[in-house]
Image (cartoon, rainbow, N blue to C red):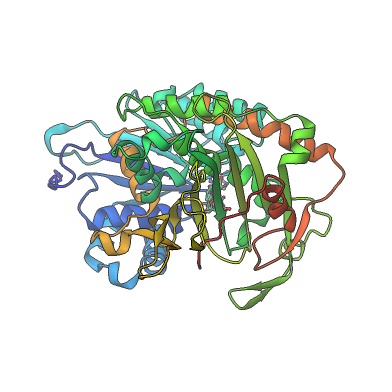
């Protein structure tokens, strides 16, 4: 059977997309809906197949049924097109296989080998997506290698967490690296796939007005907040061994920090951006135990009200009263280089907070000279708010004169860019962009091994100190902006968190 190529997917190779953990939450809630959206827009290359792998005894029809259900649950009604659902479901297969079991891999070998020919006889790229527990990454890759299914053009995609500290991250990277070379490995940080995060690079480097100001001469400090209203959901088992530092700071928040702080690469290419991000991670000031005590806050939510609904405490949520895991972190970081010397980067993230909001705020210095000493009204330093989610956009806060015939009355005003009102296109989910990049073979928005390990190198002294220090996480009621100690962290420096209007 020969399959026709569609116009939008022209130039892209057909893929065999094997999803280990194909019946799991990530696959059914995120990956398949993302592939569906690309199907809807005709971007999935002709001949592409999606092979879900799990231990569950399921035939192709059973899995197709599960995928169809997942699409009806996770795709909004106005984006659900039954024709596109059918086209995607037709691509789907299921294979019952245990990653730990050396038996049965010939079934995957045969499935990948015996496939319909694609028009033009193009090579089919094999993508192996590891949507399974990290402990299975190494064994799965080993079995893939032994089964002889890894070709030079094959790719492997790994989800975070990659390790729980530097040593275990190295072990995972070594195990995967024994079968795939670094160019074949795509480590997902889904924050890098968010539209607003990619736009950060464009804002900084496709405009000229910011760059002269983007340094310690004009920037007072930077704040990066990722606050969630959600708790740990069904992932309590994983989360309780992880905590907010490993779950969010080691990856998403440090990646955001890198994009704010990095130098302009010569061009945006597969290694150039990652080279610059690595330099930022390597320039992060290492923390001594005293620095950890002074510059970090860890918190944990107690029972409270989120979006008007009563929610239990973290320990009740996970049913583990003795837990010492943190659900909130605030950190004062410093980037020790020419551009950022002396500029604090304050990071905070937490679960069950007062609102869902991810934002970067660049706070500029006060004007060097007060020109309007007798003016009335309020002034505040210029600030650039980059709203990552929800309501993606940017807001530049400045000071203006309020119209009037009298004296000069100053007032804070803002220049606003809202994605929703400026662009007609929908913002794709991060996974849509990242999965297409895997198919295109473009690793720019994926984490390289050295980045992951440099991030762990910076995080590890914090983990070690927290493990050694006797004090438990500070309490904060669910539905608030975190423990008061997080506010104190900035107040000590004469600053405060910039809370955007909800
Ligand atoms: N869910 C999310 O939003 C996110 C998840 N992640 C990461 O993605 C990975 C998967 O998470 P999630 O989908 O939530 O987990 P789930 O527990 O929902 O799913 C796990 C999947 O792996 C399969 N599986 C388990 N053991 C084996 C095995 N030995 N051999 C083959 N398949 C196996 C399960 O099927 P079966 O039991 O039938 O074998 C199931 O399909 C984890 O590493 C997680 O940390 C990362 C970011 C977000
Ligand atoms: O990686 C993770 O991210 C989510 C938050 O992602 P977002 O895109 O909804 O902001 C977080 O809930 C989860 O704990 C973490 O593992």
Point out residue 483 in the picture as x, y percentages from the top left corner. Answer: 72, 58
Asked if residue 100 shows in the view, the reply is: no
- Quadrant containing the N terminus in the rendered view: top left
Q: Along the horizontal axis of the image, is 182 left or right of 336?
A: left
Q: Residue at x 12, y 34 (%)?
A: 120
Viewer-proximal residue among 193 and 82:
193
- The answer to which of 71 and 365 lies nearer the viewer is 365
Occupied quadrant, residue 333:
top right
Left or right position of 448 against 341: left
Give the percent coordinates (x, y) of residue 433.
33, 46
Tell me if 83 is positioned left or right of 469 in this view: left
Depth order, front residue of 420/442 = 420
Task: Residue at 43%, 45% (x, y): give it.
Answer: 19
Residue 36 lies, with reference to residue 17, above or below; the image says below
Could you say where residue 90 lies in the image, as x and y percent from the top left?
A: 27, 56
Task: Tell me: residue 203, above or below residue 175.
Answer: below
Q: Is residue 242 visible?
A: yes
Q: Which residue occupies 46% across, 39% down?
A: 260
Q: Tell me if 307 is positioned left or right of 147 in this view.
A: right
Count of number-bearing discs? 0
At which x and y percent is residue 365?
A: 51, 43
């Amino acid at each position: 059977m020969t399959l026709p190529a569609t116009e939008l997917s022209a130039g892209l190779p057909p893929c065999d997309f094997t999803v280990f953990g194909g019946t799991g939450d990530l696959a059914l809630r995120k990956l398949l809906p993302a592939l569906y959206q690309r199907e809807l827009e005709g971007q999935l290359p002709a001949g592409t197949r999606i092979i879900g792998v799990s231990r569950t005894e399921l035939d192709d029809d059973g899995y197709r049924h599960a995928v169809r259900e997942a699409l009806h649950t996770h795709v909004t009604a106005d984006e659900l097109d039954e024709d596109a659902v059918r086209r995607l479901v037709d691509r789907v297969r299921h294979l019952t296989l245990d990653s730990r079991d050396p038996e049965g891999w010939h079934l995957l070998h045969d499935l990948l080998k015996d496939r319909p020919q694609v028009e033009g006889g193009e090579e089919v790229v094999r993508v192996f997506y590891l949507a399974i527990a990290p402990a299975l990454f190494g064994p799965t890759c080993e079995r893939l290698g032994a089964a002889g299914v890894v070709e030079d053009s094959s790719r492997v995609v790994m989800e975070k967490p990659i390790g729980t500290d530097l040593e275990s991250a190295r072990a995972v990277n070594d195990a995967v690296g024994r079968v795939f070379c670094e160019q074949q490995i795509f480590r997902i940080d889904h924050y890098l796939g968010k539209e607003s995060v990619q736009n950060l690079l464009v804002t900084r480097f496709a405009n000229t007005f910011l760059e002269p100001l983007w340094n310690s001469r004009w920037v007072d400090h930077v704040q990066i907040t990722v606050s969630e209203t959600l708790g740990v959901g069904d992932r309590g088992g994983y989360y309780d061994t992880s905590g907010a530092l490993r779950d969010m700071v080691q990856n998403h928040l440090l990646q955001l920090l890198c994009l704010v702080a990095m130098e302009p690469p010569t061009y945006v290419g597969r290694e150039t951006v990652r080279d610059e991000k690595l330099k930022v991670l390597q320039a992060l000031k290492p923390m001594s135990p005293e620095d950890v005590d002074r510059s970090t806050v860890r918190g944990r939510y107690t029972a409270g009200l989120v979006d008007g609904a009563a929610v239990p405490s973290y320990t009740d949520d996970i049913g583990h009263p003795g837990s010492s895991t943190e659900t909130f972190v605030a950190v004062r970081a410093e980037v020790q280089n020419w551009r950022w010397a002396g500029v604090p980067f304050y990071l905070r993230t937490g679960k069950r907070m007062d609102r869902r909001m991810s934002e970067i705020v660049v706070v500029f210095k006060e004007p060097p000279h007060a020109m309007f000493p007798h003016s009335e009204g309020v002034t505040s330093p210029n600030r650039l708010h980059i709203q990552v989610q929800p309501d993606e956009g940017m807001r530049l806060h400045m000071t203006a004169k309020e119209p009037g015939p009298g004296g000069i009355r100053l007032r804070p005003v803002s220049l606003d860019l809202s994605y929703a009102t400026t662009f007609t296109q929908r913002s794709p989910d991060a996974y849509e962009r990242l999965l297409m990049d895997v198919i295109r073979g473009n690793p720019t928005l994926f984490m390289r091994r050295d980045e992951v390990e440099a991030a762990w190198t910076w995080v590890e002294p914090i983990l070690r100190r927290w493990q050694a220090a006797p004090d438990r996480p500070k309490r904060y009621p669910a539905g608030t902006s975190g423990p008061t100690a997080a506010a104190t962290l900035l107040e000590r420096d004469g600053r405060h968190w910039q809370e955007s209007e909800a």
